[in-house]
Amino acid sequence: MIMSKLWHIIKHEYTRHVFRKRFLFSLLSPPLAVIAMVGVALLVGTFSTDTTPVGYVDHSDVLDNPVRQDVSNGVFDPMIEFQPYQEEDQAQAALESSQIQAYYVLPEDYPQTLNVELVYQEEPGTSIQSQFSDFIRQNLMAFENLDPAVKERLSEGSLVTMAALDGSREMREDQWYLIFTPLIAGIMFILVVMTSGGYLMQAVVEEKENRTMEIVITSVTPNQLMTGKIIGNIAVGLTQLVIWLVFGWIGLTVGGQFWPVLQDFSLPTNFIVVLLLILLPSFVMIAALMAAIGSTMTEMREAQQISGMFSLPITIPFYLSSTIMMNPNGLLAMVLSYFPLTSPVTILMRMAFTVVPAWQIALNIAILVIFALFAIWFAGRAFRMGMLQYGKKLSIKEIFRKSVQ
Amino acid sequence: MSIINVSNISKRLGNTRAVDDLSFEVRPGEIFGLLGPNGAGKTTTIRMILDIFKPDSGEISVLDGPMTEEKKNHIGYLPEERGLYQDIPLDRCLTFLATLKGMDETIASAELQEYMKRFDLYEYREKKVKELSKGMQQKAQLIATLIHDPELVIIDEPFTSLDPVNTEMVKDLLEMKRNEGKAIIMSTHQMNQVEELCDRILLIDHGQRVLYGTLPEIQSHFSSRDIMVTPLSTLPDSIEGVSEIRKLNGRYRLVLEEHAEPNKILRNLINQGIELTKFEIAVPPLNEIFIKVVREQKGDDHV
């Protein structure tokens, strides 16, 4: 019976937010904004990429029998045609008549010096330059007079791997996303917490404003009501998160067609687990605090002002990001990562820029869990008292004083 | 057996004594009027019965013992301050509130159909609550109070914003519930409704019991020794045993001498050949009793 009532509260709380236009807006606007931004960037990129052929003059014989693999990187990075010329004069003439947009000159001693010369009127884009160096590299491999050591290095490619001194963490050049993921997770966390926490606070204030509270409270216990509301709103937040992740996944899959580098994206499982262990209690803690504010306030406007004061400490680590980035194990970073409200974002940022010892992460999670439980208790108290004082504000001191009784 | 037994409860709210050593009981199969001027402590008393907060002292027994979560399913409450979820459709709102009373969702929505038809709300069931008129919201709230067929109904001003047709319908419904043996506590300032519906009343002021008993008991306690007569012709200038004759709009109020008996006066009038269409002992309307008692209380305060 009690479980079924709780279930009904969760369901009610969930549906009343999720099936509203407002939710749809907050759900779709960030991905749409990203799509719009990427779209604009792509359009600009496509139109600014010059697909005119590029010429080359080879005095070194490296490109005598040129081989070229298809290095097409998708529609936004099309393969440029490379046009051989015997002499610089011819190439220069072609450049001046705009048949080519630039030309490379490989001097006779190129295999020793590896120096090339690029002649242009307007500098070609980086993608053209990297296509040309790929082209030379492929042909150098086949070139006989090359130092074997250079050949070996060429065949391995350049993949730089950085490792922490204790070997606990490695970072490879092509895993750039391991730095960005904690940061993006932090931003998504703030967005989700703020919207669904805001809903929760609003739900509580509304119930007080429209007096539904008195009916509800003579049907269920305050704790049931609060628990149901918090779970319902966390479900709203998770829905939001899951839908964003689906968007992200679609983005990566579709984007992978155009930028193969995105196809490498994969996250280690333990990283995801740590992320969840940090974010879930943080979420509960903030939701419960929002509910507590809602219980003590009598007007929505007031409640929003107070909750604004709350969101500040949550986002503060972002404002201080340069300091944290420069010194992720410094005093400021440490202090912020143990203070419950700043903790979630700070610890994520530290995870991005340094190796955080496991015990520190564990301590952080423990602090967050304890504060989450405390916040639920506090919300229950605040609610029970706020309930009885229609039209009157409730001070934090009062809640504590009466809680002791 | 009583549904509610309140003994000697007191409650301070801030510096005021909202309820002061109050005792009463409510029995099954009765409509119990809880009356009193604004700020008398009615709502505080109701909230204590419902365990929204506890009395500082005294005992409350509801449905045979202290309040439990299970008992909340057998209580229907229409608070003074009205409220429903505004942004969701009416049927979803009411179904949700019914499930909070422990009703199964399918049973609740079937029952709800019946109630909405009876209250002429059926065609508005998919409208958002905030789009409904005040009277409709009031009816919706009455449905939320009664849908789970509670043993104990506590309603605060049930007739505000209702038109005469709906008022009659709600009255019939309450009488039906009474006849089924449910107990109904009704708090209202509409004294005519109390006279029509209530079996017993409790009038409180300053948190204290001022009047308590059946309606006839209380009225006879306050009745003066007056007789109201409506004759077809005029009355004689003097009647034996009557000290004063007051003419009021086609009727007469006869103020009796100290030992005069109403029966003798009736016989006397008939013997004189005066035809009467109406002869009754003047019962003071509850309204008058209310005003008189509350004024007296105020007078006491000044002393």
Image: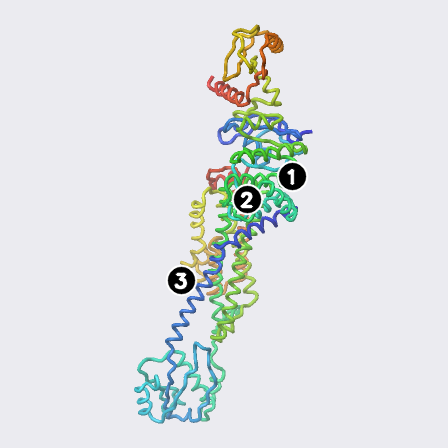
Dot 1: element? loop
Q: Is residue A208 above or below residue A102?
A: above
Q: Position of residue A16 (x, y in %)?
A: 54, 51
Q: Horizontally, is B207 left or right of B72 in the view?
A: left
Question: Can you give x and y, in whole percent of width and height, for residue A327 in the image?
Answer: 42, 62
- For marks 3 and 1, give the one nearer the viewer: 1
Judging from the image, mark 2 belongs to the subunit labelled A
Q: At numbered mark 3, what does the secondary structure look like: helix, strand or loop?
A: helix
The one nearer the camera, B285 or B77, is B285
Give residue B112's quadrant in the image: top right
In which chain is the residue bearing label 1? B
Which residue in the structure is indicated by mark 1?
A: B149
- Image quadrant assignment for residue A36: bottom left
- How packed mark 1 is, by other alpha carbons closer than 10 Å (few <14, some 14-19, many 20 or more), is some
> Which color scheme is applied?
rainbow
Q: How far apart are the two marked residues, 1 and 2, measured between alpha carbons?
A: 30 Å
Residue B192, horizontal then vertical, whole percent: 55, 26
Viewer-proximal residue among A357 and B152: B152
Q: Is residue A366 visible?
A: no
Name the kind of residue labelled 2 in the image: Gly
- The chain containing the residue under callout 3 comes to A
What amino acid is labelled 1 in the image?
Answer: Asp
Residue B50: x and y in percent read 59, 35
Mark 3 and mark 2 lie on one chain; the one further toward the N terminus is 3
Q: Which residue is mark 3?
A: A322
Q: Looking at the picture, do discs 3 and 1 lie on one chain?
A: no
Q: Nearer the viewer, mark 3 or mark 2?
A: 2
Q: Residue at x 39, y 92 (%)?
A: A60
1 vs 2, front mark: 1
Q: Secondary structure at mark 2?
A: helix
